[in-house]
Image (spheres, rainbow, N blue to C red):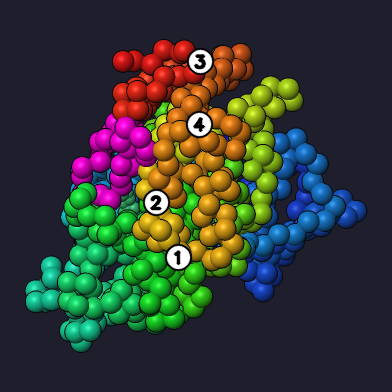
Amino acid sequence: MQAWLRSLSFPVPSSVSDAVSLARFELERALPAYSFRLSVQPELGEGWSFSRRDGEACLAGGPAGLLYGAYHLIQLSLSGQALPEEAASAPRYALRMINCWDNMDGTVERGYAGRSLFFEGGAFQYDPDRIRSLGRLLASVGLNVLCINNVNVHFPAQLLLEDLLPDLAALADLLRPFCVRLMISVDFSQPLRHGLPSADPLDPAVRAWWAEAANRVYAAIPDLAGFLVKADSENRPGPHAYGRSHAEGANMLAEALRPHGGVLVWRAFVYNCHQDWRDTATDRPRAPWELYMPMDGQFADNVILQVKHGPFDFQVREPLSPLLLSLRHTPMAMELQLAQEYTGHQIDIYAMPPMWQELFRDLPADRICAITAVSNLGRDENLTGHPFAALNLFAFGRLAWDPAVDPAEVTRQWARLTYAFPEAQERQLVSLLMGSRRVYEKYTAPLGLGWMVNPHVHYGPNPSGYEFDQWGTYHKANHTAVGIDRTRNGTGYLSQYPESFQRRYGDPSVCPDLDLLFFHRLPYSFVMKDGRTLLQRIYDDHFEGYEEAAAMQETLKALPFPEPDAGVIQERMQRQLANAREWRDVINTFFFRLSGIPDQHGRVIYD
Ligand code: GCU
């Protein structure tokens, strides 16, 4: 259960009820060789400083800072390092949130680690010790907000604002010592459930209803972080039904939260999900920028616009969302997805830190004020299904604290804390993990094209599964070419970017290979920078991807994982290999049958 904190096997007793006593408890139990002096300095907030002189170890910080400092020191020690003479740290972002997509019937939307940790059968149902362990895990990497219910708010989650408040408050109490605050997803049309004829954000009765709802919630949970809203997106209700803008909708909710210090997190994942595939004037990635740019500066200061990192939806590779680079007067959160919806369902290995480093290469850290990620957690014994999926949670916490964190270093820290292998084996594991995204990328949809997955499930290949559907995710492969031209000669999407990005992506002879088919429509005969044709590159990547997955299996067999991880890792690797084989053959066959062009190396492609 304890993932990277396996050696903290002692439970946190329920009597430990605040962050300072928790920090003291953890330090005394985990590092008995030291005598710590804890100095509460509220002005340090979530930051902390540490010094060690003449046998005395002094940790200073606000209550949360003390807790984060304590976990930092404990993890240093658990990974075999000596405590430093001096150290200090503070988080880059104030809001570091996990978004659970848990439904109250116990299912988890896009959940690959079992049922909900919080709900079952339409009610709260959890093991308090497990929730405390979860709190410890989140706090150990500095995560401070947990949104517990799905952004698609299904009944009875609407009752979180009403009858279920005492249960919500009880959960908040459990997590409070860990400095993890709750957030809830709310349904924009909620007032309709209470006899109001509309949910129009400019209607005074609606505004009064939300203000009252916020008063009720904050009376029960005074430190609730706020509300999260998915509106006018994938058939969810929203202000557009009343001819109102998203700024008007968000500001109305923000006003209700303001007296309580709450934030309103508004998701920017809005696009036409009823597109006619024949319609070439609409290009889905353009949607968020087109909707929100005209509203820049119109949002209240306690609204945060939550923008997915790419313009589509958590594909293996997408360029950074141009919205993140363009809004100047709107506080934004970048949304990542730890749940491996399109990246292997926590069956296939997919370590995310290298991808996140690429995002922050393009995104100046100060363009956003918060960072959030869709949860990969569930009721499975190990919490994340695949034991390696815990790396993504661990690394997300580290990244949210410091976006400049080195992916290899964070992966190494996780591996060391989790498995404590001898150095050579640790290196093998870290290198396998660091390469895992590229392997997955090679055997799935090619060169930035994305999608090509089995519809709805999003695991396994189906090149035309979404091609004639309404979701705006088309590849338009025919017998000579593939992709959509998103330059100014095409859909114009590329024009949403700053000049330097337009230079990077605009010319196919300059555009990085791995992004080529995101931005361009190209003939199979297009010659890549290394002299290979586009189609040969697709074939090569798919053959290599499978071979590399097979090599991963061999490496893993030789590493001394303890049980139960060893069994789970082998079993999932076997499934990954079967998936890689399926992808390889389906994608290669798809392009071969369309183009009639054989593999130059004569490998097997099915006719
Ligand atoms: C994806 C995902 C949905 C989810 C949506 C969202 O489309 O498949 O399950 O609801 O993203 O982010 O809201």
Q: Where is residue 77 in the image (x, y as percent from the top left)?
A: 73, 40
The mark closer to the camera, 1 or 3, is: 3
Judged from the image, the secondary structure of the residue bearing numbered disc 4 is loop
Whichever of callouts 3 and 2 sits on the residue coming sooner in the sequence is: 2
Judged from the image, the secondary structure of the residue bearing numbered disc 2 is loop
Residue 577 versus residue 474: which sits nearer the camera?
474
Q: What residue type is labelled 1?
A: Gln
Dot 4 surroundings within 10 Å: few (below 14), some, or many (20 or more)?
some
Whichever of callouts 1 and 3 sits on the residue coming sooner in the sequence is: 1
Residue drawn at point x = 61 percent, y = 33 percent: 530
Q: Name the residue under label 2.
A: 485
Q: Mark 4 points at which residue?
A: 533
Q: What residue type is labelled 2?
A: Asp
Q: Position of residue 253 (x, y in %)?
A: 31, 76
Q: Which amino acid does label 4 sit on?
A: Thr
The mark closer to the camera, 4 or 1, is: 4
The magenta-colored residue range is: 453-482
| 113 shown above or below 483 | above
* Ligand 1 within 8 Å, label 3 CB: no
Q: Name the residue under label 1.
A: 496
Tell me the CA gap for discs 4 and 1. 29 Å
Q: Mark 3 points at which residue?
A: 601
Q: Quadrant of residue 142?
A: bottom right
Judged from the image, the secondary structure of the residue bearing numbered disc 1 is helix
Tell me the CA gap for discs 1 and 3. 40 Å
